[in-house]
Image (cartoon, rainbow, N blue to C red):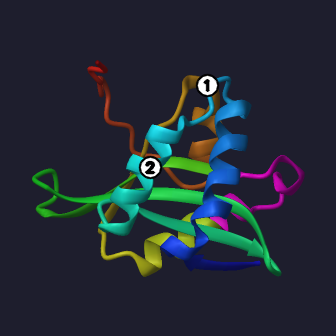
Amino acid sequence: MEFRELTVSDFDQIVKLQRAYKISIGEAIPTAQGLSCLKEKFANHEIRFFGAFDGELLIGICSIVKMFSTFRYEYLGMIDDLYILTSYRRRGIAKQFIDYIFKNEDCSTLGIFCSDENASVIKNIGFTFPIENTLLKIE
């Protein structure tokens, strides 16, 4: 398994996995407008993507946004999407992926948004410090 930061030239592969991810969690697939916005933010380095590869095949993606946090007065990386193709799950890839990102990203802390049904999986790959009552306002 190889892990690396993705570039804009990988965008079409990212879109394929983004669509598979959204379908797997029961959300609508990204619109053309949404993908255009994502590509712009990605090209401007406002969001970063990392990929997990089996040879040439992209089998996992992780998106991360870095921000300065007053929680630890250091950089915090927030993971919004972590997706591994179904046929590659239960092999420890997600944990290896997160370990790679943690070692290669200039962040002292990684956080992740996850649903209640995925919380146990996320804890198993090393996210063990809950911050209670994180609430989002979505327009």
Q: Nearer the viewer, residue 106 or 4?
A: 4
Side (left or right) of 8 relative to 17 = left
Of the pair 98 and 55, the residue shown nearer to us: 55
**Viewer-closest of 62 and 38:** 38
Residue receiving disc 1: 27
Name which of mark 2 and mark 1 comes first in the sequence: 1
Residue 91 in magenta? yes
Q: Is residue 6 visible?
A: no
Which x, y percent locates residue 100? 55, 75
Residue extent of the magenta highlight: 84-96
For label 2, the residue is 36
Number of other residues with Cα within 10 Å of mark 2, as a class: few under 14, some 14 to 19, many 20 or more: few
94 in magenta: yes
Name the quadrant of the C terminus: top left
Alpha carbon separation for disc pair 2 and 1: 18 Å
Q: Amino acid at mark 1?
A: Glu
Nearer to us: label 2 or label 1: 2
Q: Is residue 10 above or below residue 76?
A: below
The structure residue drawn at horizontal position 62% and vertical position 69%, both measured from the top left corner, is: 51
Against 95, residue 27 (above or below) is above
Task: From the top left corner, tell me how far across and down residue 106 is, in percent.
Answer: 31, 76
Q: Is residue 84 left or right of residue 12?
A: right
Q: Position of residue 47 (x, y in %)?
A: 36, 59
